[in-house]
Amino acid sequence: MKVTYSWLKEFVDIKIPPEKLAEQLSMAGLTVASLEEAGGDWVYDIEVTSNRPDWLSVRGIAREVAAVTGGRPKQAGPTTQRVKGPKMRPAQDFSLQIENEKDCRLYYGALIRQVRVGPSPDWLRKRLEALGLRSVNNVVDITNYCLLEYGQPLHAFDFARVQGASIVVRRAKEKEELSLIDGTTKKLTPHVLVIADRNRALAAAGIMGGKESEVSPVTKDVLLESAVFDPVLVRRGARALGVATDASYRFERSVDIPTARLALEKAVRMLCELCAGTIAAVEQSGNAAVGAPQKISYDIAEAREVLSLDIRENEAVRILDHLGFGVKRAGRDRLVVEVPSFRRDVRAKEDITEELARIHGYDKIPLTYPSIKPFVMESPAVRRLEALVKERLVRMGLKEVITYSLGSREDYKKTSLQIAEDALCVENPLSQDCSLLRATLIPSLLACAAFNLNQGNGDFEIFESSSVFEGGRESVRLGVLLCGARRSSWSKESQEYSLYDLKGILQDVLQFSGAEQAVLEDASFAPFEAGTCSRFVAGEKTLVVFGKVSGPVRRSWGIKSRKDIYLAEVDVEALAGMARFSKRLNPLAQTPSVFRDVSILVGSGVRYAQIENLIRQKTKGYLRCVCLADLYQGKELPQGRAALTISLEYGCDDRTLTDAQINPVHQSILDGLTGELGLTLR
Amino acid sequence: MSFDLTHILDEAKAQLEACPDKEALGVLRVKYLGRKGLLQDLMGRIPGLPPEERRGFGARVNELKKSLEALFAGKESALDGAGEASAKGFIDVTLPGKMPLLGRLHPLTQVGNEVCGIFSRLGFKIFQGPEAETEFHNFEALNIPLDHPSRDAFDTFYLRPFDASRPGFSGQEKKLLRSHTSPAQIRALKNCPPPMAVVVPGRVYRPDAADASHSFMFHQVEGIAVDKDIRFSDLKGILIAFAKEMFGPETRMRFRPSFFPFTEPSAEVDISCFACAGRGCSVCKKSGWLEILGCGMVHPHVFKSAGLDAKKWRGLAFGMGVERVAMLKYGINDIRLFFENDIRFLEQF
């Protein structure tokens, strides 16, 4: 809402300079977005919150200025000043009918005859232009002037175009058409309220007038409308038509019933004075009664209690009075506050407290510290686990990414994934690229990898932890992606990532979460290269799926780099179901260990897991640790073969083992490897 | 009989100077300090001296011994050092140190954690709500009625089944992507009866076309504290405590009246610009102030929605955008950078 300093001064004494006023208004909640000097005047652009339609008028803002500055409202004051208007006359010249008063509570029509349409006087034109409105002609300008002064939208019809001299406020008919003033033609539906004559729609009620009945240089008689339309109807109608106007903006936020009459009277007077018109008739349809004002009993102690603000009774009364409230004293510190019709936002004592605080000044409220009492609230295991796992991945050198939860059908296609039957999507997406709620993080991480590779970042290790949506269920997933090599400061030492790096990270996460019992299984999953994909399962639940991203998927994401990409997705929700957060000490060995290495040639179908299992079976409790020491794939080995060196740590907690005790055990392992598994020792 | 001990020392110095390696050093050591060495020889002569000379001579031989030992030790460590250097081949301490590869939390997570951490220390607990919310929690419960212009500030993505043949949501169960974290206020109040205080971090969604300052997905941290005697002045206290810890002890704060449907009274909070200490600069657009969060006293309607007696309880609530705080804090001028996840961006935080 724009307003000028000089116009405000018509309604209130202002004794402070324009800049100071801007600051004071901002600090009272009328945020002045800009203040500009123009032609010896000052233009304020004020942000108006949706609860204050009364601020969408010069008079409404003047009321605030009076309250904020303590300035005297002029004459009868901006709230009660009345323009002498014509008396109601019985309908002779035209008829007025509202089909449903729910849609239109009140409608005034004033017929002004013999109007001379022409340019507006300079002062009027300048005032409108200063506030960003274009001057059209004196009649239209007068309606706009009153809109700005009162916040009540008015509309002027060329009476000659009103067929049958009858105005009907009704719902549009299905497929009824209306050409609007802006030159567009709209197809209407019964959701739109129209002002019609005997035959057709003339205007979209409260939204925009029609081209055909627009006031033009040849207009002689003007029918002036001032009405109160249903806010929701106007809001929906404006949206349906894709039109937003100064009028619809105000009607959506509700207009004030008594003001509708005041604005009409002022406009009629201006039309008579500035356009040489004569008032022929004023017709009213609907209900102009506002009922008795709402009364709120208010104890000033409330302000002290809620705000810690010691506000004196006289000051409270002055503030409320300047804001247009009726105030009666009802004992010490007790007030009965009457809410004016233009303050529909004020309903309870909290609202009065806010008014007092706002005008008295938030800066005068002291600063106190609350005592926040300790209380018990258990945080869900999944959130605890998520935070801990994120921290752990960071310690491993991974970077967290945050990607959009909304993706597209295309993302799934590129990743060779099917969209689940129960997937959710956005009804009103900005674009198809972000319309589908993701049920997996895999496409997002691939997109992220593709982006980074395109940027020339060849080596990275990233993860994301985020909600995914499977039908109505929202759960937390963790995605991990390794690409290229683990960088080192001096680049020759960089180590290419392998599937084992990814598996190691996942094993650590599982172990850390207390899910060591998870079992590794071969799996096949479309985005991954065959033979590289596995999963960790616990009972029925798949905790993790991981593998190497397949060539076709890489290509469809536009990844040209030859670097390998390894990717995993963890079901944090399932993992949290089995998570243990407590730790127990594993006693340190008190007797020395004996180390023996075994070297074996593998690649003939026997897998490491079988070898490790066999070793564990044969060692009868003497085994402290078995670990892979080396995997060798040299030229001298046959094609497809590798040499494993496995390091065995033998020990016994109650005595020191001798060679005599270890040798038979170790030998049985060697026998088992060669005999049972048919492996060749090296 | 007189011995020129000084001469022996000088000769030893010269020979050590010329000594190329440890082997030669060993030979010299035998010559001077060995069991049949020069020094031992001198010691052996002491008994044969006249009694009045013995004491003085003995002392001088001892001094010579100490000097020689020091010379040999010095030469030995010099040869050691040279040996190590030659073994490694080359040392240049001005070469760059090898920086460890560090992982990072996303800057938005870091800022969110920092905010939540400060409130945790003030006694708040962390609570999280769903991102796919019901229309009731996102709007009605928070005093934002249907078809009211107050909804304009909360343009919202509505959800429907992707498979159009499946039944959609209806009525209040209509699902949407939450347009703010405030619906979690209702869930927290239902979940955890007052007195209570929680902060709610999380993702929120609004259909804003992407540009340097808009993103359809962003993050908020919401806070609510409810007790019988909480006051508006407490908001000032708790928020200045937060601001000073987050933005520095010099931070000043101001409250401006505002409107949020779910608080009454409501305020926008500005902090003094940390880039210019309030003098006015490009960061604060010359105003000296930065708008940082919205807050207010919990509206009675919110208590009613959560099934609480609005006469019995009072609460304070506040909320802020994590992206905004992070952008101000780190001098980031394009919100899209957060979601591109360029490694070169992520590694700076």
Image: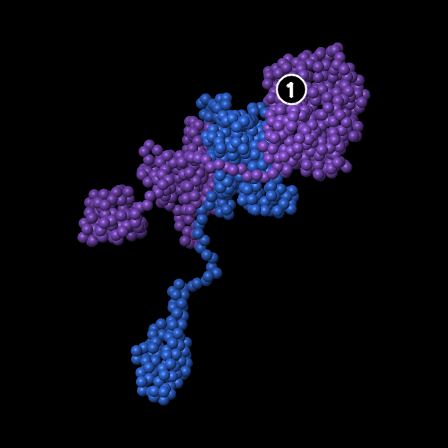
Chain colours: A purple, B blue
**B116 and A235: which is toward the camera:** B116
How far across and how far down the image is residue A585, in percent? Answer: 32, 45
How far across and how far down the image is residue A665, in percent? Answer: 20, 48
Whether residue A317 sits left or right of residue A446 in the image: it is right
Quadrant housing residue A529:
top left
Q: Residue at x 65, y 35 (%)?
A: A361
Query: Is A617 located above or below residue A280 in the figure?
Result: below
Residue ID for mark 1 = A229
Q: Can residue B144 be seen in this view?
A: yes
**B172 and B305: which is toward the camera:** B305
Quadrant housing residue A56:
top right
Q: Which residue is drawn at 75% across and 12% down?
A: A89
Task: Say which amino acid is labelled 1.
Answer: Phe
How far across and how far down the image is residue A641, in percent? Answer: 29, 47
User: What chain letter is assigned to the residue under label 1?
Assistant: A
Q: Which residue is drawn at 50% across and 23% down?
A: B172
